[in-house]
Image (cartoon, rainbow, N blue to C red):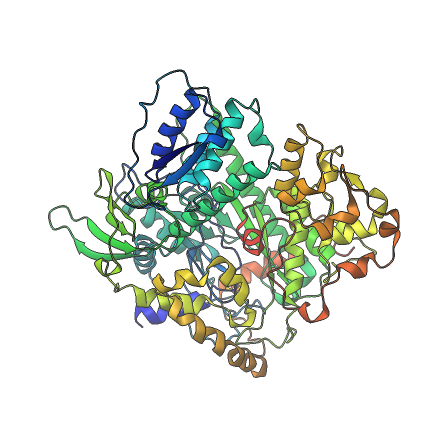
């Protein structure tokens, strides 16, 4: 099979992984070295496919043959998809050729599991080793690891990679037992704990001034959860994400709406969840990480699923009207962050500018704050919302999108940044 | 009122602004213009810039000015000088912290446009391999790019860091940047015809682009807001886009009509056996609770 045909199969097999970040790596570049590559800035999307996803890395599987039978996955052993396998040298060549043409920021390598976890992991690590040691490649490398691989191999992966990840796939063991019978939540989390320990250990060593420079280690780990393949509610998904951020210090949790695959499984829903659900989960995730929200405030036992029609911050504000209106000239940061329509950056600008002047609506307009959205919730030097407005039952109706846009309007910006920034992790 | 005509580069503006500031010339009395608006009209030196003390300016302002200078809006020189004046003689040293000030805001917006253009240049430059130096073995690449603003100098450092191990040139209509392994240098702009059209790898890249696309998640607007059409003409993958979009409906239809595959039994494999054994004795994972 020629390289083009392999690439076709093994990129197709990798496209269901949403992760694309190439930021957050340690600063390094190719000056004074023998090869090419640099990392450490904000990530760059070198292209976009018509699915709106950023193309920043060469994202491929080493092989799409797999012993496992994860029913949401095109590569599971029950699928009749055509199989292919790259040699490590082929992946190395492709990565360097694409990189030198500025098509990509680096490599995201994953693999179906063949023979055993360790056997597979050795092949994956070998690609990274060749890139780093034989070709002096200093670009971004993201390696997918297998929880059951030996700690020594995961350590080697971390030495060569900027980021490593293990996909949690589903938020509960019940879901996994049904749809991914070989996978196990506790073992996955154990492996994440091990990686967290390594990352922090290396970080602490780096800060000892007199110690010799420690060998590099990945600066972060991330994971992906599938949405809509099992019946987990948004509350369950977000609780799992919150635990992963808190306990294992993950950089990112990616949410991937289950999408139909060419080899459907008898065990799975035929109809995919609306794409907007995934979008709302990203927004909620942002609220947890940057806006000081708690999971129970966004998705509670009483209302376990996010409102698909309103962004979760606005939905929260409408449920908590007593908090509003808040005075943009006085309210502390934590409260300003709760105002629908005020993003992290504009909150900082407001805090800085109000030290010198009392802010009026015209000032907020300068900041391009969405006025229609914020007005009912704020007080400014020349504005007090009609109390009536906040109590009014029709307030929610005012924010609802026109019905025809419901499942189409993905360009509408989420709470912070645009949809791309939500994906790539930049604020 | 005096008219100051400069070459449209940051250094020229900075030198003239310094002189004017030392002479305490208020912004209302200066009309700025550059060669872009008045071609052929050279800056006549009306008075030697006095080397008197120049008030200290926040470093953040100079960074901002360097970037704003690369914009093409004719009002930028005057706007920069006004903010500079307010920062120094106007008694508003804190001015840059006031993002709600219309003049500061305008500078920020120009900066943002420049920053975006630089970012897109970093993203969408496509190098083509033209030769390999026989003596050194270094590969030589050439790219053609059409930035919206005059950002080649601002954007070039990134390419030096990333591609130090190869020789490269980036050609644009108004300036070119070159790296030979030891020095970055610049030359005047050239026409499109000076750059190569194809690279042997382009076809492989298009294969990748086609294969990584998921037809079940069509989001054309999200793609276009990040990769506006004006860049498409220099992207080897762009000609595929229309076909991928129009073909996606049929592909999804087919997936939905495909008969579901039954689960296959596990093959004989010692590793799978060991996994199964582990799964059977694994205690259930801890928090959070499995159902709310
Ligand atoms: S382990 Fe599961 S998700 Fe990964 S390739 Fe195999 S079947 Fe797919």
* Residue B166 in view (yes/no): no
Q: Position of residue A189 (x, y in %)?
A: 61, 48
Q: Residue at x 85, y 50 (%)?
A: A390
* Residue B197 in sight from this viewpoint: yes
Q: Along the line of sight, which residue is nearer the eye, A378 or A234?
A: A378
Residue placed farthest to the left in the image?
B135
> Where is A205 relative to A119, above or below?
above
**Could you say where residue B112 lies in the image, as x and y percent from the top left?**
49, 44
View extreme (top): residue: B53
Residue A358: which quarter of the image?
Answer: top right
Rendered-image quadrant of the N terminus of chain A: bottom left
Report the residue at 76% width, 32% height from top.
A330
Check the image and name the residue furthest to the front. Answer: B1
| Residue A213 in the figure: left or right of residue A401 | left
Nearest the eye: B246 or A271: B246
Where B225 sits versus B166, above or below?
below
Whole-percent x, y for residue A422 in the image: 58, 52
In the picture, measured across the screen, residue A281 lies left or right of residue B254, that is: right
Q: Nearer the viewer, residue B277 or A30?
A: A30
Q: Is residue A406 left or right of residue B272?
A: right
């Amino acid at each position: 099979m020629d390289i083009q045909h392999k690439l076709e199969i093994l990129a197709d097999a990798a496209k269901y992984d949403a992760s694309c970040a190439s930021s957050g790596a340690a600063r390094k570049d190719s000056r004074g070295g023998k090869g090419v590559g640099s990392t450490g800035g904000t990530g760059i999307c070198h292209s976009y496919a018509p699915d709106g996803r950023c193309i920043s890395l060469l994202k491929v599987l080493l092989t799409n043959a797999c012993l496992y039978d994860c029913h949401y996955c095109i590569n599971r052993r029950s699928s009749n998809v055509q199989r292919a396998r790259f040699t490590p040298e082929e992946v190395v060549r492709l990565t360097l050729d694409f990189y030198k043409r500025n098509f990509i920021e680096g490599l995201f390598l994953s693999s179906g599991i063949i023979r055993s976890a360790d056997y597979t992991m050795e092949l994956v690590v070998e690609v990274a080793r060749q890139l780093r040691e034989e070709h002096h490649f200093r670009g971004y490398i993201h390696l997918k690891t297998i929880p059951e691989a030996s700690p020594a191999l995961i350590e080697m992966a971390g030495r060569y990679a900027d980021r490593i990840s293990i996909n949690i796939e589903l938020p509960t063991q019940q879901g996994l037992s049904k749809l991914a019978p070989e996978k196990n939540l506790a073992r996955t989390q154990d492996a994440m704990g091990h990686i967290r320990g390594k990352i922090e250990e290396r970080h602490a060593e780096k800060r000892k001034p007199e110690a010799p420079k420690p060998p590099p280690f990945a600066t972060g780990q991330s994971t992906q959860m599938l949405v809509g393949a099992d019946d987990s509610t948004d509350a369950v998904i977000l609780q799992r994400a919150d635990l992963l951020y808190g306990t294992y210090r993950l950089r990112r949790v990616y949410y991937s709406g289950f999408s139909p695959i060419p080899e459907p499984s008898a065990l799975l829903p035929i109809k995919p969840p609306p794409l907007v659900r995934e979008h709302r989960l990203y927004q909620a995730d942002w609220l947890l990480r940057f806006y000081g929200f708690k999971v129970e405030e966004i998705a509670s036992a009483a209302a376990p699923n996010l409102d698909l029609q309103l962004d979760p911050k606005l939905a929260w504000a409408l449920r908590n009207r007593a908090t509003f209106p808040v005075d943009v000239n006085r309210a502390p940061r934590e409260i300003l962050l709760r105002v629908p329509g005020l993003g992290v950056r504009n909150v900082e600008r407001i805090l800085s500018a109000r030290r010198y002047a009392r802010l009026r609506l015209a000032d907020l307009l300068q900041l391009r704050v969405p006025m229609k959205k914020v007005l009912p919730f704020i007080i400014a030097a020349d504005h007090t919302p009609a109390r009536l407005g906040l109590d009014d039952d029709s307030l929610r109706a005012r924010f609802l999108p026109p019905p025809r846009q419901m499942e189409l309007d993905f360009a509408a910006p989420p709470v912070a940044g645009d949809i791309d920034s939500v994906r790539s992790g930049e604020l | 009122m005096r008219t100051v005509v400069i070459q449209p580069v940051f250094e020229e503006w900075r030198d003239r602004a310094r002189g004017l500031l030392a002479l305490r010339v208020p912004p209302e009395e200066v009309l700025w213009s550059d060669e872009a608006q008045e071609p052929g009209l050279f800056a006549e030196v009306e008075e030697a810039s006095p080397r008197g003390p120049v008030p200290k300016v926040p470093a953040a302002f100079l960074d901002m000015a360097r970037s704003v200078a690369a914009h093409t809006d004719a009002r930028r020189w005057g706007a920069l000088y006004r903010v500079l004046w307010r920062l120094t003689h106007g008694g508003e040293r804190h001015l840059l912290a006031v993002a709600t000030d219309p003049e500061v805001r305008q500078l920020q917006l120009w900066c943002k446009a420049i920053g975006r253009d630089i970012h897109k240049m970093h993203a969408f430059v496509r190098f083509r391999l033209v030769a390999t130096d026989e003596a050194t073995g270094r590969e030589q690449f050439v790219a053609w790019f059409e930035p919206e603003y005059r950002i080649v100098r601002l954007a070039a450092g990134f390419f030096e860091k990333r591609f130090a191990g190869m020789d490269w040139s980036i050609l644009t209509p108004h300036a070119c940047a070159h790296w030979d392994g030891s020095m970055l240098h610049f030359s005047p702009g050239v026409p499109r015809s000076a750059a190569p059209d194809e690279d042997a790898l382009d076809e492989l890249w298009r294969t990748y682009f086609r294969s990584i696309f998921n037809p079940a998640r069509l989001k054309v607007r999200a793609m276009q807001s990040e990769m506006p059409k004006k860049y498409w003409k220099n992207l080897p993958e762009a000609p595929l886009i229309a076909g991928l979009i129009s073909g996606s409906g049929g592909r999804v239809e087919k997936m939905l009509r495909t008969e579901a595959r039954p689960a296959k039994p596990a093959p004989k494999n010692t590793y799978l056996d060991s996994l199964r054994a582990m799964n059977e004795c694994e205690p259930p994972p801890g928090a959070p609770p499995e159902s709310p």
